[in-house]
Amino acid sequence: MAATRLRIFISSVQNEFAEVRANLKVFLLGDAVLRRFVSEVFLFEDQPASDRRVDEVYLDEVDRCDIYLGIFGNEYGSEDHEGVSPTEREYDRATRRHKTRLIYVWGSEDDRRAPKMRTLIRKASGELIRRRIEDPSALTAEVYASLVDHLDRRGALRIPPFDTAAAEGITIASLSRKRVSWFLETASRERGFPLTPKTATKSLLTHLNLLNEGKPTNAALLLFGVDPQRVHRMAETKCVQCHGTAYERPFVSYQVYGGDLFDQADQARDFVLSRINRSVGLRSEFVTAPAEYELPSGAVAEAIINAIVHRDYNSNASVEVRLFSDRLEVWNPGALPGTLTAESLREDHASVPNNPLIADPMYLARYVEKAGTGTQTIISLCRDAGLPEPEFEERHGSIVVTIWRNWVTDEVLAALGVSDRQRRAVAHVRKNGRIVNSEYQEIAGVPRKTATRDLDDLVEKGVFRRVGERRGTHYILGRKK
């Protein structure tokens, strides 16, 4: 049944979940596994203008769909002449047409819900199993698990997605209770996770959808396993420090980190931070002296953790962290989903996690933040640190993030013959991320022609990079040639 194609109807109060609905649609059509089976996702707001009645349009779409996906929050929605909202009409229509219904109840505080929404939730609870969720990451993980289960029961999945498949030869007893207890305590402290530190391992795995017919999944093994590499040899992170700017032996240092994913993330981050320059401040405001790294520690961690969470675990390659004299490269085995490009990672974009059942626990432990913002966080942190903008590209079967080190030092500027007034422009870009001609005229106290000549000189020397044309032209820090 590999030819199974699904139409999914997403129902909710539109104003309450507009962004959630849009991001969920992108995920369903972009996920490496689900996009093979999902042919259409209906959102009413995507429909063109029509002279048909609104209720006719959305109820006809319910009739056409294979799966009704309802997100029930606090609001009930606008009511028709009979006092019934579109959301409830859609749910009732899906029930009468015997559609597969997946219901997700947003939040746990029922007293904040509109009375009619509480009634609708009780009605749905009496007819089918529904899940409670608290945030977009949890919704993505729950929808992913539900659809994979639906496809599996229909025989559409010959090979289940990596993170949902049962880990070969692994039982619940073979997972690390120490890591489970740490996770429960951390998730409770960081995200208000409802389970207590004494919760049984099986209960936690059930809650996180990390069991497949009672057996721990690959995601469970990678997150909580004692030795995940015994089953998945390449589920590791390689860290290399090179002498110069080329990837060539002999290396300064070479380490391979195994263990669970939390350990790998910590060790790979520490590998980088221990090998880059660090300045130590005064103890005037802190008990211990604050340290500032030449690369923002948050950007380093974000790049590494994103690679570990979103990599293709069916690949024979490892996550690689390469530290050069002028840059840091983080290699993530796999490809971007069809809905994203390397350039779109710089802009607002929906989260399309390659391994949702790994991403959700990493979020709960605060190893990653809001879904879909990791690359923008890296850009922002580098800009705030006065560094060149990072690069994102697909290279040799991997997604590569490049974070540039501070190569524009006083010594380099002196060697390049950069004047004092040009250095003011460099300082301005370090602080603000960019500069335009008129700003340089004011900073340097020179006419437009001189400003243009000075800025062109900095571009020629590689200190600046010109972006845009004509009135939209601005300058940012260059990357070492």
Image: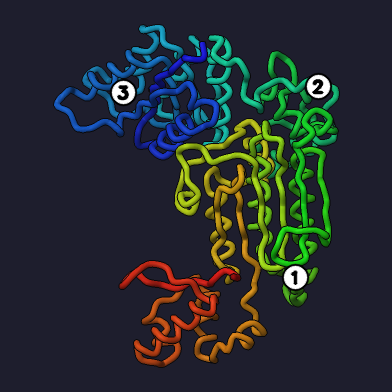
Q: Secondary structure at mark 1?
A: loop
Observer able to see residue 11: no
Near mark 3 (Cα within 10 A), the count class, few <14, some 14-19 or many ≥20, is some
Classify 257 as above or below 228. below
Amino acid at circle 3: Ser
Q: Which of these two is toward me, 287 or 436?
A: 436
Mark 2 or mark 3, which is nearer the start of the sequence? 3
Residue 91 pos. (x, y %) = 38, 16
Near mark 2 (Cα within 10 A), the count class, few <14, some 14-19 or many ≥20, is some
Q: CA distance from mark 1 to mark 2?
A: 42 Å
Q: Residue at x 72, y 42 (%)?
A: 318
Q: Which of these two is toward me, 381 or 124?
A: 381
Classify 409 as above or below 19. below
Q: Secondary structure at mark 2?
A: loop
Give the number of the mark in front: 1 or 3: 1
Classify 78 as above or below 370. above
Task: Determine the image quadrant of residue 165.
Answer: top right
Q: Which residue is mark 3?
A: 85
Q: CA distance from mark 1 to mark 3?
A: 60 Å
**In the shown orientation, is residue 454 left or right of residue 301?**
left
Tell me the tag on residue 277.
Answer: 1
Q: Which residue is mark 2?
A: 170
